[in-house]
Amino acid sequence: MKTKYNPSNMKKFQHLLIMALISLPFLSQAQVLDYMDIKLRIVEKVGTETQPLPNTTLNITDVGELTTDDEGNVNFPYAIRNNVDPRVSISLMSNEQRVIKPLDASIALDTAREEMFIEFLVVNMANESAQFKKRIRDLERDISSLKAKNQLTKRQLEAMHNQLIDTILHFENIRRGLESEIEGLSFENEEQRKELEQKNQQIEELSYQIDDLTAQLKEALQERYHQKKVHYDDITSILASYIRKAKDLKNHLAWVKHYAAGRGTQNYINAINEYNDTFKEMDDKRAGHIASVANYWEKTPRIARDLEDLYNFTVKSVHAQVMLPIFNDLLEEFAKQRPKKAEKLAQEASEPLEVNLRDLERRINRVEKGLRKTLHEL
């Protein structure tokens, strides 16, 4: 028995097939690669102290609603997905408290670890002083302005924000301590009245001090982060340019027979000139690059040593011992008009050169990863 052809059924099948094909990329993008155990803690600023925020419901992005225990803790597995920035972001299901640290109530995760302990600091603004509220507002405004300028990375902004928050909290605790001392005075005699006057003056001076220090710190951090980004971009750019020019020159080995015969030789000469220009620029900059990394990445001195080793390997092992002899010898064979000898040299040189360039690329990737991973640190 033959099945009767039904056009409407075919259209339905085509529609389902198209929808399935469209959804495949999204399924791929959402693929879970691994899980990380997250130990999250919520603490609240209360006066000059912090204390756990118990039994508080919060919404965690990509996880859902969870409630902290009596110690302000909540644990959960976090799904690490491809093409998704791994970070935990929360929002409190309360209008009383607000998260002031970390920035945007969001923390980036280190996917190389199996578990992470992370902490969020919240405050009840109704219990805070007018000066504290103003400084938090000013900081939020400044961070938003820096975001708009797009000169700093997200992690640099987060680190800057955290340090400035810590500075504001430190001075706020000092101010509260002075106010507590004032409350303990009875003003029964001239000596206590003078002490009151001194305490009020200290509070006023402290206010100017914190505003000035916060402004200076923000400017210094901004400049420092900006300089780190400038040096990072320059280092990675010249290394990428060098490996690209070296590979381009290596690819010309396959055409040596034609060049030796006078066909397309100018393309080969152009490639050599471009390589030489790039090498000279890198060699001229390398001492400055190493010094800059030693200065701006001083908390991880290993990176400066790795960069110096990388430059030494590039200049001595790749350029002086491989690139220079190979291509100088080839030019000599061209001058002597010996195409077969030039072709033999090119064939013999191709594999060792490929091995050296692969090794160089691995070293470059390792150094770039170290620079990038610590780019946001102070």
Image (cartoon, rainbow, N blue to C red):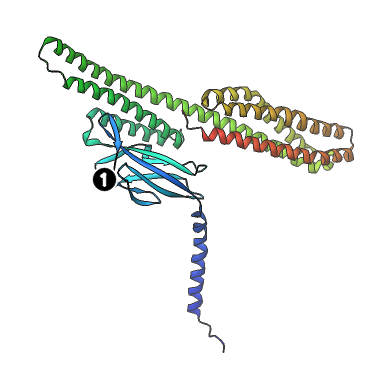
- In the rendered structure, which amino acid carries the disc numbered 1? Ser
- Give the residue at x 30% y 33%: 50
- Give the residue at x 35% y 28%: 166
Horizontal side of residue 301 vs 67, given as left or right = right
The quarter of the picture where the N terminus appears is bottom right
Task: Mark yes or no: residue 88 visible.
Answer: yes
- Residue 341 appears in which quarter of the rendering? top right
Q: State the SS at label 1.
A: loop
**Quick one: 186 or 69, which is closer to the camera?**
69
Horizontal side of residue 29 vs 203, given as left or right = right
Task: Mark yes or no: residue 108 visible.
Answer: no
**Quick one: 50 or 376, which is closer to the camera?**
50
Residue 112 drawn at (x, y percent): 52, 42
Question: Which residue matches tag 1?
Answer: 94
**Is 47 placed above or below 27 here?**
above
Residue 309 drawn at (x, y percent): 65, 28
Residue 149 drawn at (x, y percent): 42, 34
Residue extending furthest front? 70
- Residue 39 appears in which quarter of the rendering? top left
Horizontal side of residue 167 vs 372, given as left or right = left
**Quick one: 330 or 163, which is closer to the camera?**
163
Horizontal side of residue 328 vs 145, given as left or right = right
**Is 320 placed above or below 68 here?**
above
- Give the residue at x 68% y 35%: 360
Residue extending furthest left? 188
- Residue 346 appears in which quarter of the rendering? top right
**Is 355 placed above or below 27 here?**
above
**Quick one: 241 or 62, which is closer to the camera?**
62
